[in-house]
Image (cartoon, rainbow, N blue to C red):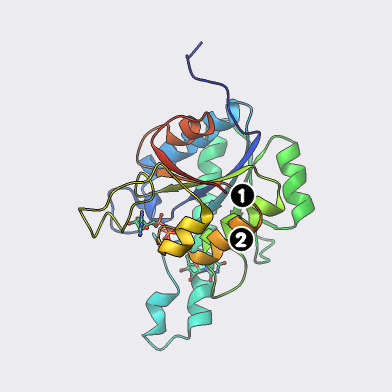
Amino acid sequence: MTGRPEPIYKRVLVKVSGEALMGPDAFGLHQPTVDRIAADIAATHSLGVEVAVVVGGGNIFRGVQVSSQGVDRATGDYMGMLATVMNGLALSAAITRQGTQARVLSALDMPAVCETYTRPRALAHLDRGRVVVFAAGTGNPFFTTDTAAALRAIETGCEALLKATQVDGIYTADPKKDPTATRFDRLTHDDVLHRDLKVMDAAAFALARENALPVIVFSIHEPGSISAVVCGEGRATTVAS
Ligand SMILES: Nc1ncnc2c1ncn2[C@@H]1O[C@H](COP(=O)(O)OP(=O)(O)OP(=O)(O)O)[C@@H](O)[C@H]1O
Ligand SMILES: O=c1ccn([C@@H]2O[C@H](COP(=O)(O)O)[C@@H](O)[C@H]2O)c(=O)[nH]1
């Protein structure tokens, strides 16, 4: 007995920020941090929750970085999507080391590296109890992995999108820039869109709103935060209609 309540979801999608994977470093993958996040994903899975993951790429590359340096935006975005595949492979390997089966499904076809995303394949892996790591975002430039997270969550019937990020919820303004910003416990999708709160892009929130997908924003830096949130615990902002 851990004293923790039962999970409130059967299937969730966890969006893991790429920047979170660099831990205290300035770039790339910080293996102890990757292992800690993988352990929390495995612990969540061991509670009987089916877990899908979308991983970002901000620790390695963002398309907009090169658009001012003579590389066109679409090419830069494909480079960003490749960064998310590297992160997906690292996270999947770390989850597997925890003793939990995981598979990487890429929106861009690269059969020598990992499986290609199809919805039936993703559902089959989830039904078989595997953690599914979605990589390469939506497979399209001019999108983000936040939008991929909302899209994949809806496609695969997840009951909530858990955005594991740098901050412990949604604030009146970016708390990294405005020390007077205050945190919300609960918001509607409309609130987030009308107030133009930037924690996740508007396309992702619009998709979540249209499909009544709850979004829960919490800090990935808090150990055990993913398994806490699936049990309705921990510090977070819940966005629901
Ligand atoms: N109103 C707000 N409330 C909370 N956070 C906000 C707000 N506005 C902007 N932010 C910022 O949004 C950031 C969330 O971005 P995060 O790095 O998790 O996502 P991402 O850019 O999708 O990930 P990646 O690192 O993979 O690119 C937070 O670090 C926070 O500083
Ligand atoms: O659907 C997508 C998803 C991502 N990209 C590109 O990848 C990088 C990294 O993703 P983050 O969401 O910023 O973590 C992003 O900056 C885009 O360049 C994409 O083109 N399409």
Q: Are marks 1 and 2 in contact (CB under 8 Å)?
A: yes
Q: Quadrant of residue 237?
A: top left
User: Which residue is painted at 51% across and 74% down in the image?
Assistant: 77
User: Which residue is painted at 21% across and 53% down in the image?
Assistant: 180
Is the residue marked 1 within 8 Å of ligand 1, measured from its CB?
A: no
Seen in the picture, residue 96 relative to 48 is either above or below; the reply is below
Seen in the picture, residue 75 relative to 101 is either above or below; the reply is below
**Closer-to-camera residue (197/5):** 197
Residue identifier under label 1: 213
For label 2, the SS is: helix
Give the spatial CA distance, label 1 vs label 2.
Answer: 8 Å
**Quadrant hosting ligand 1:** bottom left
Residue identifier under label 2: 207
Q: Whole-percent x and y of residue 99?
A: 58, 30
Position of 238 compared to 7: left or right? left
Q: Residues within 10 Å of mark 1 (few under 14, many from 20)?
A: many
Q: Is residue 136 visible?
A: no
For label 1, the SS is: loop
Q: Whole-percent x and y of residue 195?
A: 41, 62
Q: Quadrant of residue 117?
A: bottom right
